[in-house]
Image (cartoon, rainbow, N blue to C red):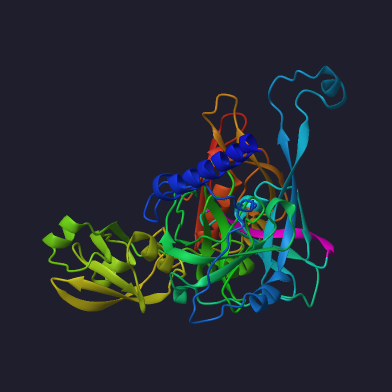
Amino acid sequence: MKKYLGFTLAGIVGGTFSLAAYQFILKPNEDSHIGIVQSVPATFTNNVVRTLPPEGNVDFTTAAEQSIHSVVHIQTVSKVQNTGYSRDPMRDFFFGNGARQPVIGSGSGVIISDDGFIVTNNHVVEGSDKVEVTLNDKYTYSADIIGTDPATDLALIKIDEKDLPFIQFANSDNVRVGEWVLAVGNPFNLNSTVTAGIVSAKTRKIDIIHKDLAVESFIQTDAAVNQGNSGGALVNTNGELIGINSAIASTTGTYAGYSFAIPSNLVKKVVNDLAEFGKVQRAFLGVIIKDLTPDLAKKLDSKSLNGVYVEEALDNGGAGEAGMKTGDIIRKVGEVPVAGFNALQEQIALYRPGDKVDITVTRNGSEQVIPVTLKNKEGNLNMYKRNDEVMNVLGAELEDFTNNYGNIQGVRIVKLGSGKLKAAGVKEGFLVTKVNGKGIKDKSDMQEILSLADGSIYIEGIYPNGQKAYYAFGL
């Protein structure tokens, strides 16, 4: 008994000593940065819990219900020429070593009218041979591409249906940094997915559109957006469209915290042009500009860095003709303040050639308003005619042409019917290399020049026998 009692007493004393040592020596105090790692429940990636502002209860259900039926799933089929050497003899036997293999793509779109017009990204439908649209109610339709604008990464497509649920546009100029928004789309083919975030910046440029005359002035959000969200809706808490989701900032190709949407005001202008003309009527201010820097602002005695510095007002531009000068600082377009180059670019992109807009500038410390008539890139007020109308009056079947050496290219007349070309004396086989003195590479170049032309057309080129020829006719 004495032996067991001794063991028990020793155990009690040892336990008491260990507890005291933990309390006074080993246990970290509350201010220490070293502590025991707590076991926490596992969460899926992107399952972020947000704390809503205490002064207001933000309810996303209404916005989701009003927008989700207007967002569609787009699937595209295109064919890519396989020009490399194949290592699969069985495939070569059945398809050949240069066979065009189908490539499937997917994205999102937003219904903007009850008769089937849908806006999406250009990169969703670019190069597609077939476009299919699946509505939120799972009905599927074949879609026609009405027009595309690579410079803004927008496209307009249409399905043959009536009484569709369409979304209402909001004024994206009124969007404020910090307000709640929803991204609605089909990431990874997960149809009708809704994510929430806030607007984290406006007029953001990320150098993702590598096209001539590119316009980048994105709304930046932290709403989760992934592959398949492209072309989907960014909506406010009223369920109104404030942007078309277009890109993410990521080193992995998947969402990493920031997404970017094309502002709804720009979307509305572009799709209206595509619906009416098949091409965007792009206006130009006619100035060479740069953002204000602290050194430049100090030199100009400008207390604010918001605005755009005019390095030169071009002689044939609307701004120069209206009296804008080198050294002016553009502060507003209409009633909208412009903080920098991207904001100015976005606002001017909302107009067509011939539109008049008040430009507020600061000159020698004083503010003044200059009424400017905007022009096209050719320096006149002409607007594009529809491509199909222009090409139809030519009365010819055309094809792009480049010789084997690549030093002669243009548009070849394959077949002539009744029209302007035949009436002017043009023969089949003629290769058009210039239109109105401008070299052309393909049919799109020719269409653009003809669409903007007002009056006489002069074409020059060469016949297969080497004979050069020149023709003139009126549109």
Is 316 displayed left or right of 448 in the figure? left
Quadrant in the rendering for residue 93:
top right
Is 108 displayed left or right of 298 in the figure? right
Question: Can residue 437 be seen in the rendering of this structure?
Answer: no
Q: Position of residue 27 (x, y in %)?
A: 44, 48
At x 57%, y 41%, the residue is 11
Question: Can residue 58 be seen in the rendering of this structure?
Answer: yes
Q: Position of residue 139 (x, y in %)?
A: 84, 64
Q: Who is closer to the viewer here, 164 or 449? A: 164
Q: Position of residue 19 (x, y in %)?
A: 49, 47
Residue 269 among magenta residues: no
At x 28%, y 58%, the residue is 289
Looking at the rendering, the stretch of residues picked out in magenta corresponds to 138-150
Most common secondary structure along the magenta stretch: strand
Quadrant of the drawing holding the N terminus: top right
Residue 139 among magenta residues: yes
